[in-house]
Amino acid sequence: MKRKYRVIITIILMVVVATVAWKKFQELEGGENITTKNLTLLNSDTQEDKKSNITSLNDNDYRLEKLIELLPFVEKTIEKPAPPIVKSAREQIGQTLIYDPKYVRLSYPNGDVSRARGVCTDVVIRALRDSSKIDLQKEIHEDMQRAFSSYPTIWGAKSSDKNIDHRRVPNLKRYFKRKGYALSVTKNSKDYRAGDIVTCKVGGRPHIMIVSSKESSDGVPYIIHNIGRGTREESSLFSYPLDGHYRIIN
């Protein structure tokens, strides 16, 4: 019951805040009607009406921006230049919709499951393949064949498996470290660049994410990952304790 009351109170507060913000919005620049008037102007034939239409629409854009600024529950973000790995990871949003950890036999090299499904490691694997032609399936399989004893043995495997080794976070961490990609793990958001790869534990299970070029208003980068609902871009870099930080150097 307590939870039910908290939800009701939250909704009421949001309605109150939205109402106050709307009143402030109407006060901006005289609070012109931004719907029917502009729709009428869009159909005008005269040059003067078209100029008036453009001015009115620009004014409305300004007021809309001000309205957004008045809403405290709308998060403000900053977009910085996105490196290729971030662009490739973003392209997976809306494509990979299912979290599916099932073991699947893959072709080799460049093997992959359906783009509609996958796990957190698949976001990284696909982004590096698409952006830099780095095939982690091939790279890790070959490295494990050369130095199998250097990799974790928590699965009880006695030899490398090109179908699954590259899709396991502990193996990715070990490979990145062996390649010299490892950096210090800190709680300072400025230490994390767009395109970096970070790892953490979620409910005791290993997880991997790509640092995005989008930042919150206080400068904390977003991350791109698949934590169970498909590939998404979220503000959760420090939501779980980080235990790995890597920067791929081509």
Image (cartoon, rainbow, N blue to C red):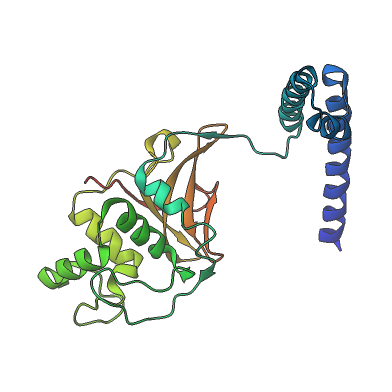
Question: On the picture, is 146 further left or further right than 117?
Answer: left
Give the mark count. 0
Seen at 46% across and 54% down, the residue is: 91
The quadrant in which residue 207 appears is: bottom left
Most foreground residue, 121 or 151: 121
- Visible residue check, residue 141: yes
Image: 19 above or below 95: above
Farthest residue to the left: give it: 146
The x and y percentages for residue 231 are: 50, 59
Residue 100 location in percent, x, y? 48, 74
- Can you tell which quarter of the image residue 38 is in? top right
Q: Residue at x 25, y 81 (%)?
A: 157
Q: Is residue 68 left or right of residue 207?
A: right
Give the quadrant of residue 150: bottom left
Residue at 41% x, 39% y: name it. Answer: 82
247 or 151: nearer the viewer: 247
Q: Is residue 241 visible?
A: no
**Residue 79 relative to residue 152: left or right:** right
| 74 lies left or right of 1 | left
**In-front residue for pair 33/242:** 33
Q: Quadrant of the N terminus?
A: bottom right
Where residue 6 appears, as percent x and y from the top left, is 83, 53
In terms of depth relative to the viewer, which is nearer, 124 or 57? 57
Residue 151: give x, y in percent of width and height: 21, 68
Q: Vertical placement of 71 versus 122: above or below?
A: above
**Quick check: 146 above or below 58?**
below
